[in-house]
Image (cartoon, rainbow, N blue to C red):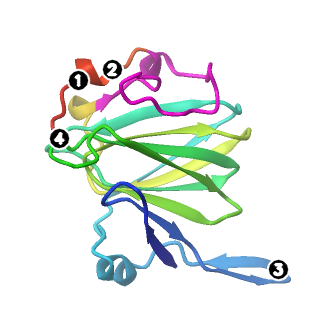
């Protein structure tokens, strides 16, 4: 697997090595020693999976506040999605900046997002399955998020009217949610 730093400090694209044969392919999706050698989290405690049936479904921007903040390792198992993350670390030189990466089942890539970031994704195809590992358990009292179209963040989403949950449509803006990181 190849680990490539991305624009925002602490974020990485991880591209899996694929071994093809007439039956299909094999890919190692995680190796603790490789992550440890790169200084990445290795203590995953929970893995989640979502199915988004419609193209143009947006989930996010989600995060958990300390002391239950989460590092995430996100991968698309079926379809394609635009994965987006926003730096909420108040002392970071990239505070309030965002970055994005297309993840797909075909490209066998993942994104590593450390604690202190909001995370979301937009489905680019129908029937997108996303899987992500986290290093802290879900803590409902620390569950938080930001509005997907917050003008202070100005994410360049490729849609104007995504499919949203009621919860995500009602999330606050960054101005209404001071950073706790």
Task: Let me know if residue 76 is in the magenta part.
Answer: no
* 57 to the left or right of 3: right
Residue 23 - label:
3
Which residue is located at x 62 percent, y 45 percent? Answer: 81
Which residue is located at x 46 percent, y 70 percent? Answer: 4
Q: Can you say whether 46 is above or below 171 in the image?
A: below
Comparing labels 3 and 4, the label whose residue is closer to the camera: 4
> Which residue is disc 2 drawn over?
173
Q: Secondary structure at mark 4?
A: loop
Q: Secondary structure at mark 2?
A: loop
**Magenta: predominant secondary structure element?**
loop
Q: What's the magenta region? A: 144-169
Residue 90 - label:
4
Q: Find the distance from the CA under tag 2 to the CA under tag 4.
A: 16 Å
Comparing labels 3 and 1, the label whose residue is closer to the camera: 1
Lower sequence index among marks 3 and 1: 3
Q: Find the distance from the CA under tag 3 to the CA under tag 4.
A: 49 Å
Q: Can you say whether 114 is above or below 27 in the image?
A: above
Q: Find the distance from the CA under tag 1 to the CA under tag 2.
A: 6 Å
Comparing labels 4 and 1, the label whose residue is closer to the camera: 4
Q: Can you say whether 61 is above or below 42 in the image?
A: above
> Which residue is disc 1 drawn over?
177
- Percent coordinates x, y for residue 64 in the rendering: 26, 39
Lower sequence index among marks 4 and 1: 4
Label 4 with label 1: CB-CB less than 8 Å: no
């Amino acid at each position: 697997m190849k680990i490539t730093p991305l624009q925002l400090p602490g974020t990485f694209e991880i591209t899996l090595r694929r071994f093809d044969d007439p039956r299909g392919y094999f890919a190692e999706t995680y190796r603790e020693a490789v992550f440890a050698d790169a200084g990445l989290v290795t203590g995953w405690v929970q893995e989640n999976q979502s199915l988004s049936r419609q193209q143009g479904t947006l989930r996010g921007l989600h995060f958990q506040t300390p002391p239950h903040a989460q590092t995430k390792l996100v991968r698309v198992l079926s379809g394609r999605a635009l994965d987006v993350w926003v730096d909420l670390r108040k002392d970071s030189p990239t505070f309030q900046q965002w970055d994005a990466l297309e993840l797909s089942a075909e490209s066998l890539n993942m994104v590593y997002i450390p604690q202190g970031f909001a995370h979301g994704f937009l489905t680019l195809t129908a029937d997108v399955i996303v899987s992500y590992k986290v290093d802290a358990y879900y803590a409902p009292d620390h569950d938080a998020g930001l509005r997907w179209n917050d003008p202070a963040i100005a994410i360049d989403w490729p849609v104007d009217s995504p499919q949203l949950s009621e919860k995500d449509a009602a999330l606050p803006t960054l101005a209404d949610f001071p950073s706790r990181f």
